[in-house]
Amino acid sequence: MENSKGNILWVDDEIELLRAHVVLLRDKGYAVETATNGEDAIEIVRSKKIDLVFLDEMMPGKGGLETLAVIKEYFPSLPVVMITKNEAESLMEDAIGSKISDYLTKPVNPSQILLVCKKFLEGKKLQSEQVSRDYTQEFASISRMLLNPMDYTEWTDLYIKIANWEMELDKHPELGLQKMLADQRRESNAEFSKYVEKNYQAWINRKENRPVLSTEIVEKYVIPNLNEKKSVFLFVIDCLRLDQWLVMEEYLRELYSIDKEYYFSILPTATPYSRNAIFSGLFPLELETRYPDLWQGEDDSETSHNKYEKELLMKLLERKRIALKPEPKYVKILDPEFGRQIQSNIISYTQNRLTAIVVNFVDMLAHGRSDDPILKEIAPDESAYRSLTDTWFKHSSLLGMFQMLANRKDVKIIVTTDHGSVRCMRGSKVIGDKEASTNLRYKFGRNLKSDEKQSIFLKNPKDFKLPQRGVTTNYIVAKEDYYFVYPTEYHKYLNQYRDSFQHGGISMEEMILPVITMEPKAK
């Protein structure tokens, strides 16, 4: 049995009539044990390694369902295929309720039996082989794409391919292809950084032939839906990467019709800039100039820069001559308890034409992993980080809100994020005065110097629609997976922040972001 493709137990009181099937399976490389009654079957399952059971439903003595119940008591994960002459729906329901793995009606034919065996005994191996072949072809395709100039739509397509393959390879760790994909993503990010450096300034100064930017999210995706007789919910999940959304989407497909589009975050890809740009519809310099009282301070605290998102949204609607009654509701969820309160009240918000909800947990997860060795142990790599996202989301108040809203026909939900995050693996030495900001992926200050291969230098911030913050202030923005470290205690901070998820710089993970429109499937 050890060299077989799998060990099968076939239980039928008329097993002699099935001898041809048994011989065929043995010829195909499977080891087959037989039994003519439930008692013998249970004994064989308990004494030998069995990978699959074919179980007759009608047998004298201990019947099929009774035998199934005992087998499942001892071996709950052992696949059992019920075989019967009875096609009654009630029997099928009883069998399925008893955790059968599949269901065949007599007379069975050889192709049915072989298909079931391949499904349960070779399915994982066959899937892995197919995935390996498909990814090898995709790897070559992506490599060819990187040899030629690409526009923003092609970059988006490439990143979607990579994110989907990350999800697929998570299911097949035995293939050992994750490093190959990670190396290709790093190569892609190197080319993407060059592309953004070359084109970004032109994007922010023109409307055509460029990606949708942070400043256009409300105008393009929210405002058009305010004309419908529906309650519109805008969820902004801080620091959400595309791969994390794909994990979350698995829980929502049965509840919603989902439409995905993509946009590019403005630079720096950090909350004070990119999220304020979403709610205001303005670039940071325009925001500072037009509403100086709503652009806070000269420090680099992200909290202080995001106090007025509701006011910025109201100003944007006012500029677009949109008056809503009652006025839009704005909620920022910073802790689980408050999230549960919002979940319990979410249906009452459908009385509003527009509700904006900011969810900060994913950002806290990214920062928490940097500071907490336990979280880093739980999520040592990006595959585990996705798994951690999955664990959070399926128990979160956010999923609870989506589930409750899915029962309403009069809602439309837009989900997006302000920026993603990148796993920082390489330090980049930066020089600046003591007043320079402390951010790891971007900095502003005087006399900043860094390696131009690892960052872009924004000498005149106004050219990039960024606040000047002083005559001699410049910005630098990290490329790829670099993070900035000052020469003082260089090795200490190099090690402290290596392998942390950060944002503010240029990478596909931080810049290419989903905008999801969801409509409940509820009738």
Image: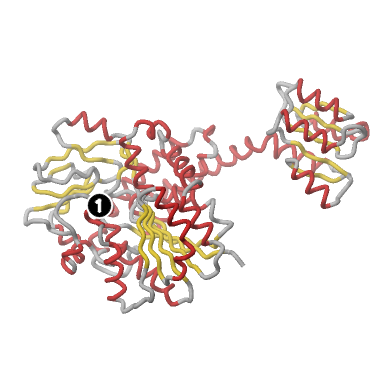
Q: Position of residue 151 (x, y in %)?
A: 35, 59
Amino acid tagged 1: Thr
Give the secondary structure at mark 1. loop
- In which quadrant is the C terminus drawn? bottom right
Residue corresponding to mark 1? 303
Residue 447 seen from this side: yes
Compared to residue 148, the image places residue 176 above or below, namely above
Q: Position of residue 509 (x, y in %)?
A: 36, 49
Query: Which one is nearer the viewer's eye here, 32 or 389?
Result: 389
Residue 153 seen from this side: no
- Quarter of image, res 485: top left
- Quarter of image, res 218: bottom left
Residue 154 left/right relative to 446: right
The residue carrying pointer 1 sits among few (fewer than 14), some (14 to 19) or many (20 or more) residues within 10 Å by Cα, namely few
- Count of numbered circles in the view: 1
Residue 403 left/right relative to 31: left
Q: Position of residue 518 (x, y in %)?
A: 50, 63
Q: Position of residue 71 (x, y in %)?
A: 76, 31
Compared to residue 411, the image places residue 379 above or below, namely above
Coloration mode: secondary structure
Query: Which one is nearer the viewer's eye here, 62 or 186?
Result: 62
Compared to residue 523, the image places residue 391 above or below, namely above
